[in-house]
């Protein structure tokens, strides 16, 4: 999947080897409502837009896969099968569910675990040790999650396509011909990758929460109410933190390799060892096809 200035595209390789591409005109929310394009705010907007487009891209891919199965069944029985498709409410439910699961796994669970550990070792939300432990648990869950799902063969292929996207984008940014041979020469790691972005959000959350929570929470008060309030505050603050991480990521993408912005993203680039695989030529062709159609002149 690729997104250009005024459209986003998805290219899928069908069972017969042919490529099929969906091209969807797109006018971002920040272009419709300029206030949403302001620094910090635009990061949260882009994140939400990306999630919505990503779900639509997955839905399109699933429809093509179902079509191949249907055509196979039709060839065997003479009767076409049904092609599943997600409607607006299904997409909305999926998006809300994914967000809730992410907040539960990477915000609520580490916080509750840190509260329980604090009861044993004698610290609470107002302590810097609390937020250090909370951050370690977050990073551990995140790294463990992306590593574990990468063991699934189908997800491993997704990671290979992820690497193909990065190589294709590097080729385009270098002004080189968009061919598989040229793309294969480039790195599968990219500073504007979502993996580096998520790492930066987690890192900023540790520093920010460690500074804010001692000002908001004291050692007194009902522990259950304080825990619930702390989780709620973290969820609310994730949006501005995502906005700040987005600005840093933008600066890193425009900076030289030795700049302070690139250095800040370096651990996130290392994490791309887990979320990318070396793509083969056919996977590079799919990524390049989507990119060509995303940036083609109108």
Image (spheres, rainbow, N blue to C red):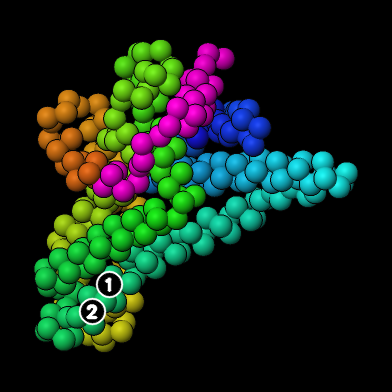
Q: Residue furthest front?
A: 76
Specify the quadrant that holds the C terminus: top right
The one nearer the camera, 213 or 188, is 188
Q: Is residue 107 visible?
A: yes
The one nearer the camera, 115 or 224, is 115
Give the left or right position of residue 258, taking residue 50 as reference.
Answer: left
Quadrant of res 130: bottom left
Whole-Å distance between the Cαs marked 2 and 1?
Answer: 6 Å
Q: Identify the magenta region.
A: 271-298
Residue that mark 1 sits on: 111
Residue that mark 2 sits on: 115
Going 56% across and 41% down the picture, which residue do you hit? 57
Q: Residues within 10 Å of mark 2 (few under 14, many from 20)?
A: many
Residue 22, how many percent across, how many down?
62, 31
Residue 174, how many percent across, how many down?
31, 17
Going 64% across and 37% down the picture, which residue do you hit? 15
Q: Is residue 279 magenta?
A: yes
Q: Is residue 37 magenta?
A: no
The one nearer the camera, 160 or 192, is 160
The secondary structure type at the circle numbered 1 is helix
Q: Main secondary structure of the magenta part?
A: helix
Residue 105, how many percent across, how many down?
37, 66
Going 36% across and 32% down the picture, which residue do you hit? 166
Give the left or right position of residue 36, taking residue 198 as reference.
Answer: right
Give the left or right position of residue 292, taking residue 24 as reference.
Answer: left
Q: Is residue 294 visible?
A: no
**Relative height, residue 98 to residue 27 (above, below):** below
Q: Are marks 2 and 1 in contact (CB under 8 Å)?
A: yes
Going 66% across and 51% down the picture, which residue do you hit? 86
């Amino acid at each position: 999947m690729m997104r250009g200035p005024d459209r986003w595209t998805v290219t899928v390789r069908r069972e017969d080897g042919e490529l099929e591409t969906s091209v969807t005109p797109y006018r971002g929310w920040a272009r419709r409502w300029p206030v949403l394009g302001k620094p910090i705010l635009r990061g949260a907007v882009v994140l939400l837009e990306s999630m919505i487009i990503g779900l639509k891209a997955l839905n399109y891919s699933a429809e093509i896969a179902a079509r191949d199965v249907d055509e196979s069944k039709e060839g065997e029985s003479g009767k076409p099968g049904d092609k599943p498709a997600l409607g607006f409410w299904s997409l909305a439910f999926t998006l809300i569910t994914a967000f809730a699961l992410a907040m539960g796994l990477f915000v609520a669970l580490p916080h509750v675990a840190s509260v329980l550990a604090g009861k044993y070792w004698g610290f609470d939300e107002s302590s810097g040790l609390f937020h250090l432990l909370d951050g370690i648990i977050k990073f551990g869950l995140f790294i463990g999650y992306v590593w574990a799902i990468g063991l699934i063969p189908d997800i491993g292929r997704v990671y290979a396509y992820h690497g193909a996207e990065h190589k294709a984008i590097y080729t385009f940014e270098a002004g080189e011909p968009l061919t598989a041979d040229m793309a294969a020469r480039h790195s599968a790691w990219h500073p504007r990758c979502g993996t580096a972005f998520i790492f930066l959000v987690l890192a900023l959350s540790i520093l920010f929460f460690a500074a804010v929570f001692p000002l908001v929470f004291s050692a007194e008060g009902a522990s259950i109410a304080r825990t619930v309030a702390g989780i709620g505050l973290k969820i609310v603050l994730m949006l501005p933190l995502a906005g700040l991480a987005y600005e840093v990521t933008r600066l890193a993408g425009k900076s030289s390799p030795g700049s302070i912005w690139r250095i800040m993203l370096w651990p996130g680039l290392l994490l791309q060892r887990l979320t990318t695989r070396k793509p083969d030529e056919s996977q590079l062709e799919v990524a390049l096809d989507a990119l060509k159609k995303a940036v083609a002149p109108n």
